[in-house]
Amino acid sequence: MSRVPRTETLLVLACAAASAMLAASQFTNLFELTPPGGEAISAIEASDQHGYATLVLAVFSLLLLVIGITARGEAVAHVAAFAVAACGVVALLIFLVVDLPDANNIGTLDDSTESFIDAKAEPVAGFWLELAGSLALAVCGAALATAGPERLNLLERFRPKGQEGSERQAADG
């Protein structure tokens, strides 16, 4: 049994953590609408901004990560690693195009207690989780993809050498 390289293991764990952050950002508020000098009146959730797109990307990237780790062929592991990086890039684009322009915007809010008051969209936890998760997934996914396809399929390193040959002979026979 050979030893798994520490760098690839850390990259896989970082991609999994980034996917978890991206998924968690879907269930938290992105912005709190706050009038000048007051407390938050309401909040904007991620599903209000872009539906469940980031949750789908997070789940898909985790699935691709598992496929890449368990892949028997280097080509499958290579494609899975690039697809994980692509999920991170798409999530980052969603953040940059949809969410970032709304940060700290001031607009008119129709509240039930007062009519048409100005409120500022202040970023809160979900905003920062989405930024960190998408950025980490894009960077770590790209690093994992460029490490080489033979580096991603970590479970292949734990298979006994004789088992690979017997499986190939059984498939050929």
Image (spheres, rainbow, N blue to C red):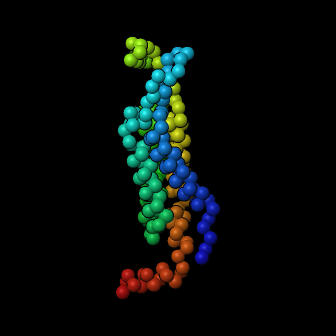
Where is 45 relative to 56, above or below?
above
Where is 4 relative to 45, above or below?
below
The image quarter containing residue 98 is top left
Residue 86 visible (yes or no): no
**Residue closer to the observer: 145 or 107:** 107
Q: Count the marks: how many?
A: 0
Residue 141: image x %, image y %?
Answer: 51, 52
The image quarter containing residue 118 is top left
Q: Quadrant of the C terminus?
A: bottom left
**Horizontal relation, residue 90 to residue 132: left or right:** left
Residue 110: image x %, image y %?
Answer: 38, 17
Q: Quadrant of the N terminus?
A: bottom right
Name the residue furthest bottom.
173
Residue 47: image x %, image y %?
Answer: 39, 37
Q: Give me the residue at 45% from left, 84% from top.
A: 166
Residue 99 visible (yes or no): yes
Residue 55: image x %, image y %?
Answer: 42, 45
Name the residue furthest front.
113
The image quarter containing residue 108 is top left
**Residue closer to the observer: 142 or 13:** 13
**Horizontal relation, residue 18 to residue 60: left or right:** right
**Horizontal relation, residue 37 to residue 73: left or right:** right
Q: Give me the residue at 48% from left, 29% from top.
A: 31
